[in-house]
Image (spheres, helix red, strand yellow):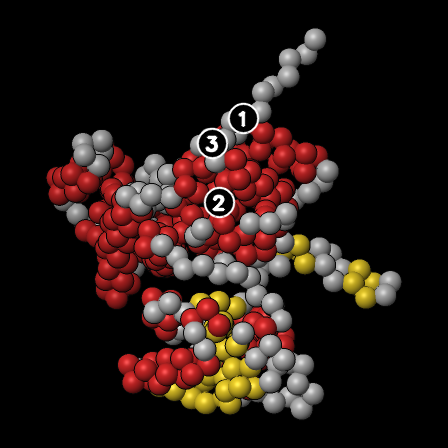
């Protein structure tokens, strides 16, 4: 067997190979990241052996190696993706502190030969689609949150009394009003009929003249009324429009996610309180659960999400146990959110949360135990191919 390591770069990659005895059979060299470079790489691979006699390893760093891995797998080569932390730790073992792309390629080959990697499988089209959509949604939500924080800061100066006027911030009515009337000074001088029409149209008739009058009265007595800043008013109008655009885009992504089929999402949605979106986000990040098969399947899933405990001790000193956070941030966040809603709606998971709170644990720590319970339940459903059934409540005799 020959073990090939590829160190990924933006414009060129480094490749090197060793055999079962750790002897270098392909000295590290560079190849371009274009079609010609791929042809030269496959030529080197064919010289090493047949498809089943060559294992290829590369780091899962960024998106530069994604296309190369897809092409190699489509052509029949076996490709394993590494956690960069594995090869980074191996590279630090060099006593002289040397680190180059060519040396990293051989480090990856040695890690592949020694088995310091998880078995990786090519994702199906549905899994790839779901993962891309989930990460796109995460990006949009993050950008929308930044816009909301920015708009809040602007309104604290332009119209501080607006806070609490609407049933909730950033509703359609709230944003539509800001787009037309971005400050207390503008609201105070607005025609009551125009203000009423804007609120009524945006709220589908739920708000009317009475609410417009109350809003205008607040604007007339506002501390910010004499102050005008055309630049901040323009920024508030534009930011409100951006938030509405993000709302539309997020809704479109979520509708597209719901068209995907995923056993993981089906299993999770059988638990009361998971919602209709987070199960798809989790499914997209996990992919095929079969790659986590083993006696400690749930521990492997938690480690992949970076949710396993990190313990540090030396001699008599022992640090506090903390979440490692070395894994998929998107998956970790989705598990945290889904644990919060599940513990509010599912009695079995509520008990897990309450037991930890009774022991004096904080809200975040108690939720981490719920996350672990959710993952354990998911792995159990995957193994038995059954949906979740709440445990029966034992009646007192």
Q: CA distance from mark 3 to mark 2?
A: 21 Å
Task: Depth check: give the residue in front, 319 or 56.
Answer: 56
Say the numbered circle drawn on residue 62.
none
Please state which of the two labelled residues, at mark 1 or mark 2, is closer to the viewer. 1
Quarter of the image with the N terminus in it: bottom right
Q: Which residue is mark 2?
A: 337
> Residue 36 appears at what percent x and percent y?
29, 85
How far apart, in angstroms, are the residues tagged by discs 3 and 1?
10 Å
Observer-nearest of 134 and 140: 134
- Disc on the earlier residue, 3 or 2: 2
The spot of residue 273 in percent (x, y) is: 46, 33
Tell me where residue 69 appears, x and y as whole percent. 39, 70
Q: Which residue is mark 3?
A: 387
Asked if the residue under mark 2 is in contact with the one under mark 1, i.e. CB atoms within 8 Å, the reply is no
**Outermost residue to the front:** 50
Please tell me the numbered disc located at residue 390. Answer: 1
Q: Is residue 365 left or right of residue 7?
A: right
- Give the Cα distance between marks 1 and 2: 20 Å
Q: Secondary structure at mark 3?
A: loop
Pair 3/2: label in front: 3
- Is 301 on the left-hand or right-hand side of 231? right
- Asked where in the image residue 263 lies, by quadrant, the reply is top left
Q: Secondary structure at mark 1?
A: loop
- In what quadrant of the picture does the C terminus appear? top right
Residue contact at pointers 3 and 2, CB within 8 angstroms: no
Residue appearing at x 48%, y 73% in the figure = 54
Could you tell me if residue 124 is visible in this image? yes
Q: Mark 1: few, some, or many residues within 10 Å (few <14, many ≥20)?
A: few
């Amino acid at each position: 067997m020959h073990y090939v390591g590829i160190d990924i770069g933006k414009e060129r990659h480094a490749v090197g190979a060793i055999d079962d005895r750790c002897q270098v059979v392909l000295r590290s060299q560079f190849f371009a990241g274009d079609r010609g470079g791929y042809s030269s790489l496959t030529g080197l691979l064919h010289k090493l052996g047949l498809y089943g006699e060559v294992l290829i390893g590369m780091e899962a760093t960024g998106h530069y190696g994604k296309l190369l891995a897809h092409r190699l797998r489509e052509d029949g080569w076996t490709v394993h993706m590494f956690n960069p932390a594995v090869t980074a730790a191996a590279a630090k073992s060099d006593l002289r502190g040397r680190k180059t792309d060519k040396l990293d390629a051989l480090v990856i080959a040695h890690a592949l030969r020694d088995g310091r990697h998880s078995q990786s499988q090519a994702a199906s089209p549905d899994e790839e689609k779901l993962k891309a959509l989930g990460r796109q949604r995460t990006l949009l939500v993050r950008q929308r949150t930044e816009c909301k924080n920015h708009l809040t800061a602007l309104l604290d100066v332009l119209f501080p009394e607006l806070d609490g006027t609407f049933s909730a911030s950033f509703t359609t009515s709230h944003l539509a009003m800001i787009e037309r009337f971005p400050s207390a000074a503008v609201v105070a001088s607005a025609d009551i009929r125009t203000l009423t029409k804007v609120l009524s149209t945006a709220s589908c008739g739920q708000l009317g003249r009475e609410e417009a009058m109350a809003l205008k009265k607040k604007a007339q007595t506002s501390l910010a009324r004499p102050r005008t800043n055309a630049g901040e008013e323009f920024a508030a109008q534009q930011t409100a429009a951006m938030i509405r655009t993000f709302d539309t885009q997020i809704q479109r992504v979520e509708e597209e996610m719901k068209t995907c089929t995923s056993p993981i999402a089906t299993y999770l949605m059988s638990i009361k309180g998971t919602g209709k979106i987070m199960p798809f986000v989790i499914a997209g990040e996990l992919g095929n659960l079969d790659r986590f098969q083993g006696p400690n399947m749930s521990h492997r899933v938690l480690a992949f999400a970076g949710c396993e405990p990190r313990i540090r001790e030396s001699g008599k000193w022992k640090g506090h146990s903390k979440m490692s956070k070395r894994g998929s941030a998107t998956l970790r966040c989705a598990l945290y959110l889904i644990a919060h809603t599940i513990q509010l709606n599912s009695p079995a998971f509520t008990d897990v949360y309450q037991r930890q709170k009774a022991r004096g644990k904080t809200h975040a720590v108690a939720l981490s135990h719920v996350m672990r319970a959710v993952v354990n339940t998911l792995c159990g459903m995957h193994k038995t191919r059954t949906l979740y059934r709440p445990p029966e409540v034992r009646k007192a005799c």
